[in-house]
Image (tube, grey):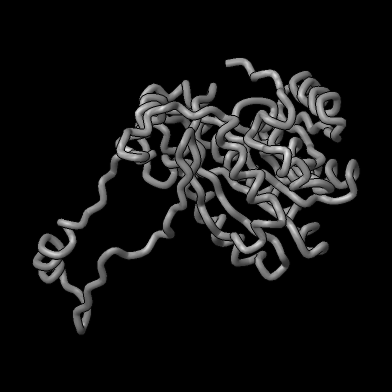
Amino acid sequence: MRPRPLRWRRTNGIGEEAGVLLAGKNAVVTGSTRGLGRAYLVGLAEAGANVVVNGRNPDQCEALAREINDGTGGNAVTFPESIASWDAGERIVDTCIEAFGSIDILVNNAGIVRDRMIFNMTEEEYDEVLATNLKGHFACTRFASRHMRAQGSGRIINMTADSGLSGYTGNSNYSATKGAIATITRGWALELMKYGITVNAISPSAETEMTATIPDNIDAIKGSRGLTHGGRAATRTGTTEECAPIVTYLCSDEAQEITGQIFGIGADRLSLYSHPDPKIRIFHEGGWTVDLIRERVPALMVPALESIELRV
């Protein structure tokens, strides 16, 4: 799946009235040479932001930076390295500050899959996914948040996934990172809100090179599993570009009051997820015994058990 050529000012859902929404803002988007990351970065650039392009392939980074600089007269620089280390997290933030003077936006997008059933998974496959997907989020946020705290403002966007919120077969390493990201999004929002920094997460749904490696996942994306709009099934497969507008909006000053939230987006659908909360609470004075649990759980809780199917 080759990246689409850029069509500036209309590619990523940015109308002319939003073309200066992020004017003067400086952004880092990790994993941004292709797929969703590219769409997010292009959306920010179209809205007026200066951007740092990141990926492991230097040629791809330079090519996208040239397209942005030539296409908009905007400013793009590159950081062609993995961000799966504390050192890289510090240096990508420094790259933004040295090029543009500050860092206002961090989009933690970089992610990989190494899919395997749990009984076949290797330690290397586990470690690789956690390093890029989770440690990369931590490393970049650790150093970006220090600068944002000093300036009294900032926007951090994390990437979760429906598999991390509901579980998914054959990619428990990936799902574990995405579930953790959902949780740390809320934790960081609480830590950083007093410094004017918002932290939100996106669960995007689009056909990409990465999702194409998960056979059942792309079927779920295409089918959208019973979602409806106006009485009809929402079966259209979303594009990466259609996932970008929510990121652009959440990075703007207009979204200052939105933090600690998870948004889903794909094709025609935009969702706001609820925070985990107990469905049922029952109390027994003196605590619970095995016999009491055997009596009460089947009657009161089993009828309310959650489905373990993936919801998109």
Name the residue rendered at 90%, 41% in the picture. Answer: 99
Name the residue rendered at 75%, 40% in the picture. Answer: 19
Q: Nearer the viewer, residue 234 or 28?
A: 234
Q: Position of residue 210 (x, y in %)?
A: 52, 25
Q: Nearer the viewer, residue 116 or 156?
A: 156
Q: Quadrant of residue 17?
A: top right
Q: Position of residue 118 (x, y in %)?
A: 37, 34
Q: Position of residue 236 (x, y in %)?
A: 42, 27
In-image side of 66 versus 36 (left or right) = right
Name the residue rendered at 72%, 67% in the picture. Answer: 195
Number of labels in the image equals 0
Name the residue rendered at 69%, 18% in the picture. Answer: 5
The image quadrant where one finds the N terminus is top right
Q: Residue furthest bottom?
A: 285
Q: Nearer the viewer, residue 50 or 215?
A: 50
Q: Quadrant of residue 283?
A: bottom left
Residue 94 sits above or below residue 299 on the image: above
In-image side of 254 versus 285 (left or right) = right
Q: Position of residue 141 (x, y in %)?
A: 69, 51
Can you see residue 117? no
Q: Nearer the viewer, residue 74 or 88?
A: 74
The image quadrant where one finds the C terminus is top left
Can you see residue 268? yes
